[in-house]
Amino acid sequence: MKAEKQYIDLYHQSEALIHEHSSAVLNKPRAKAISDFEDLGLPTKRDESFKYTDASKAFEPDFGVNLKRLNIPANPEEVFQCDVPNLDTIQSFMVNDAFYPVIKKQSLLPEGVLFGSLRTLSEEYPELVQKYYAQLADTSKDAICALNTALAQDGILLYVPKNVVVDKPIQLINLLRADVSLMSNRRLLVIIESNAQAKLLLCNHAMDSVAFLSTGVTEIFVGENAHFDFYEMEETHTDTTRFNNIYVKQEANSNVLLNNMTLHNGLTRNTVEVVLSGEGAHIDCHGMAITDKNQQVDNSTVIDHAVPHCTSNELFKYVLDDHSVGVFTGLILVRPDAQHTNSQQTNRNLCVTKDARMYARPQLEIYADDVKCGHGATVGQLDETALFYMRSRGISEEEARLLLMFAFVNEVIDTISIEALKERLHILVEKRFRGELSKCTGCVACK
């Protein structure tokens, strides 16, 4: 309990301070959350779902926590200029886990849409936020979710009311900024009501070369006939540790696209849990990871088909270089009444070196008899025949390897529906394979 004790002590010693610098809605579930955290303890490799990622060890160092909500000296508008050609977005920022009160092109948000600080908006619209906050994120089942719920003091709320379409994608840029090792605890609450549509792009960057520990909990509610695309991209550094939990609940005939892309990191654990609770709901759940050095990316997904006539499509691809480690655990759960389910899960992995490691664990649990479900996972190296063919036509070995790796991940990139982002990802991935950090033109944060 060494790692857990410092956080339990921190909460009890600072409970009044945590409450003072947050809101009543965010404060309400804290006591239960810290109690759940004490009962569960941080996951270790003895826990089946964390077999290859020791969360307890990752939380052992003494990280600073900004419980007084002191202003961090950073102006995101000056240090981050996202100069992606033709990427026309409504742009906003978070510094660590606090909303930065500037939204570029805010006037383009349709009437009735709420987007901004979760703390502030929960004070202005307490009944709305209380109806959804901490409803999907079950603190009794996940210790990291419980710790985040106990400590998170701010975050982002996106609320799109019935029949409203947000034409322009919303871009949220999360900058990790500190002079000393820092822990941040971020919340994101997304509510897309019936017949509404929106797209959200979340970009994670680390500005300083100190150690960061980040916990993130995202809750997404998608109403009947609603459409929501959520893209999350990580371009941090090797001293960054991220535990990122995403919970999704879909109503009838809703359509959701999740795409999680890790281009540069230290240790990353992404947990995704989706419940298809209305007939006709569809989820596309995709992910891509490019790693080298000693980096590690662990993606764990659960797609719960709770009712009949729902569909899901899952695709994750990894390219692992040097001594890096990849983990994919994917569960498709089909409940007894979920007849006429159609679900497909695919995991493809490329180990560029013999020292890279990939652990793939596809899983199906089917309790209905009239379904169509499939899953497959492969782990391999570059196709030597294709390499020989390309070299025989004058392409250098290095360039041939790059082309094959790029073609391998291209399938995931092509699932992106924002054309400018898709084009930019092609460039960033090529740079990444060439050993360059993923840099945005004019962006001080990435340099």
Image (cartoon, rainbow, N blue to C red):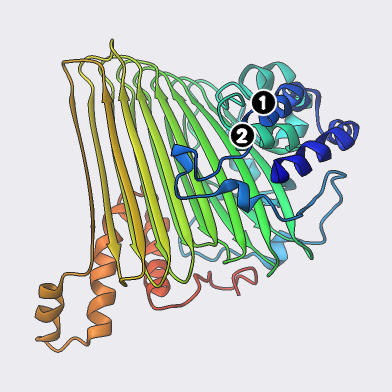
Give residue 97's position: percent from left, percent from top.
Answer: 71, 46
248 and 109: which is toward the camera = 248
Q: From the viewer's perspective, is 394 left or right of 311?
A: left
Instruction: State the residue position of label 1.
Output: 36
The secondary element bearing badge 1 is classed as helix
Q: Is residue 63 above or below residue 305?
A: below
**Residue 433 percent across, percent down from the top left:** 37, 73
Give yes or no for contact between labels 1 and 2 (Cβ–Cβ under 8 Å): yes
Examine the rendering and report whether any part of residue 169 can be seen: no
Going by the picture, which residue comes out furthest to the top?
337
Query: For mark 2, what is the residue?
Result: 143
Which amino acid type is shown beneath numbered disc 1? Asp
Q: Name the spot of residue 68 as percent of width and height, x first.
A: 88, 44
The residue located at (42%, 57%) in the rendering is: 421
* Quarter of the figure with the N terminus: top right
Residue 420: name its quadrant. bottom left
Identify residue type, mark 2: Ala
Question: Where 1 falls versus 193 (above or below)?
Answer: below
Q: CA distance from mark 1 to mark 2?
A: 7 Å
Q: Residue at x 65, y 31 (%)?
A: 146
Q: Quadrant of the C terminus?
A: bottom right
Q: Residues within 10 Å of mark 1 (few under 14, many from 20)?
A: many
> Residue at (43%, 54%) from the top-left corner?
261
| Helix, strand or loop under label 2 | helix
Left or right placement of residue 255 versus residue 206 in this view: left
Q: Quadrant of residue 379?
A: bottom left
* Figure label count: 2
Precedes in sequence: disc 1 or disc 2? 1
